[in-house]
Image: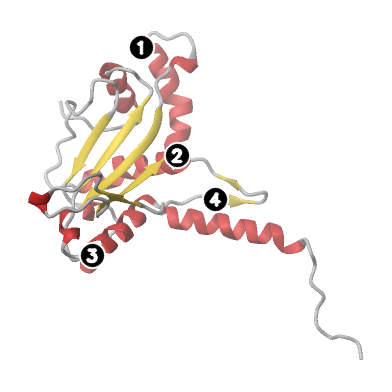
Amino acid sequence: MADEKEEKKPDAPKKEKAVKRKKEDVKKAGFAANIEEGLQVQPARLKLRYRKEVVPQLMKTLNLKNPMEVPRINKVVVNMGLGEALANNKILESAVDQLGAITGQKPVVTRSRKAIANFKLREGQAIGAMVTLRGDRMFEFLDRLINVALPRVRDFKGVSPKAFDGRGNYTLGLREQIIFPEINYDQIEKVKGLNVSIVTSAGNDERALALLKAIGVPFRA
């Protein structure tokens, strides 16, 4: 009797599985993108604007002749410190889930480097969560931060232009994670703050300020 089961094609599912994985990655990242045949993903909106508008603008503003000299963003580090996690491990678990929802990438748990008796802190104890973003996810996160999250801050008047480190890197402190639409306010147990560090290739604060202004970061006057 002939086998009535449909014979599996050895190579047919490969492309479909790859497309499905790519769609899932995009969905987890929390941003909209068009998946086309051949796994071509629409580039991040801010990334396209950086290439087409920001680079020519900065070449003129900074008097640069080579596009490769234009300062760029190397990475964005999002960090959430959790002192309360020492007494309640559930706080750390919820923070990891929330940070993953905000950034679209699995966070890394940060641990103490040494023991501090006064704070009842042991070496290697979990004290927070961190995500390092690069490439399209970095641009997508910055786009949502600038255009969606920051305008939701109560009485927002712009971010401080004095939070540079002298080498062209900028750190922004946010008091509430609930400004990100990915966070459901009704499901959080505690409002937590987080830090966003933008690492650039500018080399100095003046060039970095020009770069961040050009991509749309709303600095206070």
Nearer the viewer's eye, disc 1 or disc 3? 3
State the mark number for residue 89.
3
Above or below: residue 17 compared with residue 37: below
CA distance separating discs 1 and 3: 49 Å
Dot 1 falls on a residue whose secondary structure is loop
Q: Point out the tag, 2 or 1, that comes first from the N-terminus.
A: 2
Label 4 crowd bin: few (<14), some (14–19), many (20+), radius 10 Å: few
Q: Identify the residue at image location x=24%, y=68%.
A: 187
Image side of residue 5 versus residue 199, left or right:
right
Query: What is the quadrant of the C terminus in the image?
Result: top left
Dot 3 falls on a residue whose secondary structure is helix
Of the residues shown, which amino acid type is indicated by label 1? Leu
Nearer the viewer's eye, disc 4 or disc 1? 1
Q: Position of residue 96 (x, y in %)?
A: 31, 58
Mark 2 lies on residue: 45
Asked if the residue at tag 3 contacts the one at tag 2, i.e. Cβ–Cβ closer than 8 Å, the answer is no
Dot 4 falls on a residue whose secondary structure is loop
Q: Identify the residue at image location x=18%, y=48%.
A: 115
Query: What is the quadrant of the N terminus in the image?
Result: bottom right
Asked if the residue at tag 3 contacts the one at tag 4, i.e. Cβ–Cβ closer than 8 Å, the answer is no
CA distance separating discs 4 and 1: 35 Å
Label 1 crowd bin: few (<14), some (14–19), many (20+), radius 10 Å: some
Dot 2 falls on a residue whose secondary structure is helix
Foreground residue among 218 and 99: 99
Q: Residue furthest left?
A: 118
CA distance separating discs 2 and 4: 12 Å
Q: Point out the tag, 4 or 1, that comes first from the N-terminus.
A: 4
State the mark number for residue 34.
4
How is this picture coloured?
Answer: secondary structure
Of the residues shown, which amino acid type is indicated by label 4? Asn
Mark 1 lies on residue: 62
Q: Position of residue 118 (x, y in %)?
A: 7, 50
